[in-house]
Amino acid sequence: MVRVTNCAPEKDVDCSKSLQAVRDALYVINGKWKLPIIVALSHNKRRFKEMQREIEGITAKMLSQELKELEMNELVKRSVYDTIPVSVEYELTDYASSLDNVIKELHDWGVKHRKRIQKMMN
């Protein structure tokens, strides 16, 4: 069992702080699309349509909304170039690298979980 801190009755303050930290993290990376967007941008800068094609199933409206939230949380940088037509690129900020270990652990767990479930189904 994963235990972040001791959540015994005498440690209610510590438990509340741990829960708040997890809530804060989930607030930033919550939902179906934020982590796939971050992973897509981890390889290279991308234009909006490139990301929409790469992230199967995401609508333009949802991609736009998620990019705005990621930008607000300083994980994504939006660059607008004065070209005709105007071009916009998105890239990860240096701060986004603070999620590297989290994403790697989620990836590794996802691979193991998929194998486990597939094994159960066979």
Image (cartoon, rainbow, N blue to C red):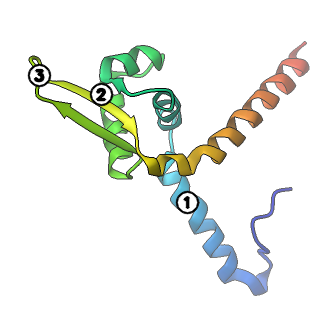
Residue 24: x percent and y percent?
51, 60
User: Which of pointers 1 and 2 lies earlier in the amino acid sequence?
Assistant: 1
Residue 83 appears left or right of 97: left
Q: Nearer the viewer, residue 86 or 58?
A: 86
Name the kind of residue labelled 2 in the image: Lys
Residue at the disc numbered 1: 23
- Spot occupied by residue 29 in the image (x, y as percentages of width and height): 50, 46
Q: Residues within 10 Å of mark 1 (few under 14, many from 20)?
A: few
Residue located beneath label 3 in the image: 83
Q: Amino acid at mark 1?
A: Arg
Q: Residues within 10 Å of mark 3 (few under 14, many from 20)?
A: few
Q: Secondary structure at mark 2?
A: helix
Query: Real-space Cα distance between discs 1 and 2?
Result: 25 Å
Q: Is residue 47 above or below residue 21?
A: above
Q: In front: 95, or 4?
A: 95
The answer to which quarter of the image holds residue 80 is: top left
In percent of the image, x 48 and y 47: which residue is there? 96
Image quarter hosting the C terminus: top right
Task: Give the distance between the C-alpha atoms of the residues marked 3 and 1, in whole angstroms.
Answer: 41 Å
The residue singled out by tag 2 in the image is: 61
Q: Secondary structure at mark 3?
A: loop
